[in-house]
Image (cartoon, rainbow, N blue to C red):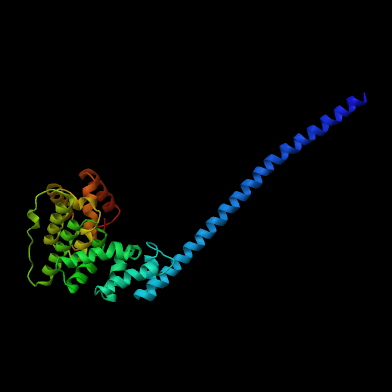
Amino acid sequence: MYSLILHGRRLVELQKCRNLRALVNPLQKVFAFSNSFSSASAAAEISLRDGRKEKTFTVSYLVDSLGLGTKLAQSISKRVSFEDKGNPDSVLNLFRSHGFTDSQISDMITDYPLLLMADAERSIAPKLQFLQSRGASSSELTEIVSKVPKILRIKKEKAISRYYDFVKEIVEADKSSKFETFCHSSLPEGRAQENKIRNITALRELGMPQKLLLSLLISDHRDICCGKERFEESLKKVVEMGFAPNSSKFVQALCLVYGFTDKAIQEKVNLYERLGFAVGDV
């Protein structure tokens, strides 16, 4: 009987241990989850703090090194940020060594902030040296590149040469009091580069200002690279809709017309007109 009682007590103790283990295991999981969540929250908080620190440093650097206004510097810091001045300094020093003025450099960084993140010696310097080797003077190089800094993101020498020469042609022609037409409008349809140059030439002849033309040259707008027939068709529609070529809205309308059918475009125009907007506001 005694042995039976002992055995019974052991079973009770064993059951208590099992119940305790069953209670502890979920608690361990809860604590593990809690610790994991706390670690993740702490990591996120540190990351956020580091991000704010980077942005603060970037804004200060843009203001102190380039003379930009605080609001403009804050806007640029949303596109690019860094935590030390090593790489940005090497980029600015490289441009200055090639004759770029502080004003030109500020304009370039404002237009294309990612230049500050580029490798000055391996990425930017070889392209500037290549353009100079083709006969570009220091004054010409700085004028052309400062107008279209995104030309420095092009990797192939043949492509960068073609775009550089085209920009130079536009800049020099615009200096003349007499409007000059280019022969690029007769370029045959082919690769995206030829299509883009021919189509931008057509926009220039239509009256689009230099600033808009040059921004389109290095842009990724598919409609600017399309064939001659389709581009002229889209261009005609935008003109007929009443958009002025000297406005950025003209470019937006061109992209819209290229990407939608006639029916879809008309439905959108009708909707906005019913809401009281003029065609130019659509």
On screen, residue 86 versus residue 40, left or right, reads left
Between residue 220 and residue 84, name the one nearer to us: 84
The N terminus sits in image quarter = top right
The C terminus sits in image quarter = bottom left
Between residue 254 and residue 47, name the one nearer to us: 47
On screen, residue 47 versus residue 205, left or right, reads right
**Identity of the residue drawn at 25% across and 63% down:** 126
**Identity of the residue drawn at 15% across and 50% down:** 231
The image position of residue 260, as x and y in percent, is 24, 46
Residue 221 vs 177, above or below: the answer is above
The image position of residue 30, as x and y in percent, is 65, 45
| Location of residue 129 by image quarter | bottom left
What is the number of callouts on the image? 0
Residue 113 vs 261, above or below: the answer is below
On screen, residue 188 versus residue 20, left or right, reads left
On screen, residue 176 versus residue 82, left or right, reads left
